[in-house]
Image: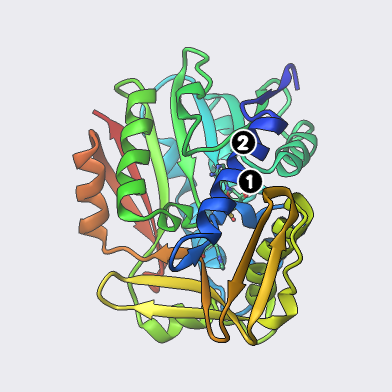
Amino acid sequence: MSHQELRICIAEDDLDAALRLDVGHGLTSRPKHLPMRLHYDGRGSRLFGELTRQPEYYQTRSERAVLRDNAAGIAAFGTGPVSVIELGAGRAEKIRPVLDALAAAGRLEAFWPFDVAEGEVRDVLAELSAAYPGVRLGGIVGDFTRHLSQLPDTGAARLVAFLGGTFGNFTGPERGRFLQDLREALRPGDRFLVGADLVKDPEVILAAYNDAAGVTAEFNRNVLDVVNHRLGADFEPAHFEHVALWDGGTDTVDMRLRAMKPMRVAVADLDLEVSLDVGEEIRTGISVKFHRGELESQLRAAGFAPEACWTDERGCMGVFLAEAA
Ligand code: SAH
Ligand code: AVI
């Protein structure tokens, strides 16, 4: 490895301010809600890794197969050196076949994992430094809803990957804003590679969010531990039930935490006390599933030209490539 740098777009006090604002607003809204990026503290990232290995969570296995089987095809688009940036990279495992294919073609100039979880970015840099000697390796600790204007630009064409179906964790308006921000940050000829969970039998989808081992439930409840640790709250996570519902009208999984008894919760750092009725739910995130044509229209509307879509043999996950037009 010749270079390695860590770019921090979010200062600790910036994170704290956003956290206070989001949690204060979310817990005083009706219905109550908490932002999805909060799930990924150290324990949350570990639980996420564990839930992706559950038999019911088909997304990770399917997308890994799509990327492994089509890496050469993905790497064949464009010409010349490529700088790969992975948004919400986590452990950056699934992108590896694409990096390998670009490296084999002598085209991999740089790789930048971008994640709100600093620990994940550091771990990826430590792991990849030996694997790609001579490739510029850097990390970005940032929020992809706020810091896309700070995407690195080495002068080479950029391939921005957004895998795992995280694109589905946005609401419709958030998705539109994200695509527009991304398009503005890119030059014509740069590319966007996005993995999306495709609409299928709702039972298969819901099972992935209700794994028998209860890992998703624990991942969901962990958001309350994060609020406890970061803002001095006294939530009792064990008294919340994990709920995942399918909304067939919007092709969305809705994740919630349901209070199993009436509660009063103090959030010391916000000087806030909230009460929950028995059965009251806190919304903790959504996961939208897509039809191919619908996703391609959204890409077009934001100024991207869809070029290819690859899926696994059961059509579970789609990986879409689009060029900034
Ligand atoms: N790409 C990996 C991880 C997906 S989990 C995979 O496919 O398995 C979602 C990842 O996005 C986590 O690593 C989480 O820390 C990150 N993340 C969530 N919200 C984010 C935000 N607003 N900005 C940057 N990263 C975010
Ligand atoms: C990261 N993201 C795509 C996951 C999903 O499937 O929506 C987050 C998740 N939440 C519960 N299980 C998985």
Which residue is tagged 1?
92
- In the figure, is residue 60 to the left or right of 214? left
For the point 23% across and 33% down, the residue is 303
> Of 108 and 230, which appears nearest the observer?
230
On the picture, is 115 further left or further right than 152?
right
Residue 68 drawn at (x, y percent): 53, 54
Determine the image quadrant of residue 273.
bottom right
Q: Amino acid at mark 2?
A: Pro
For marks 1 and 2 on the same chain, the one whose residue lies earlier in the sequence: 1
Q: Residues within 10 Å of mark 2 (few under 14, many from 20)?
A: many
Q: Are marks 1 and 2 in contact (CB under 8 Å)?
A: yes
Residue 23 locus on image (x, y percent): 58, 53
Does the beta carbon of the residue at mark 1 sit less than 8 Å from ligand 1?
A: yes
**Along the line of sight, the residue nearer the viewer: 158 or 90:** 90
Q: Residue at x 74, y 80 (%)?
A: 238
Residue at position x 63%, y 83% from top?
Answer: 262
Q: How many marks?
A: 2
Q: Position of residue 121 (x, y in %)?
A: 70, 38
Q: CA distance from mark 1 to mark 2?
A: 7 Å
Quadrant assignment for the N terminus: top right
Residue under label 2: 113
In the figure, is residue 48 to the left or right of 162?
Answer: right
Which of the 4 image quarters holds residue 325? top left
The numbered disc on residue 206 is none
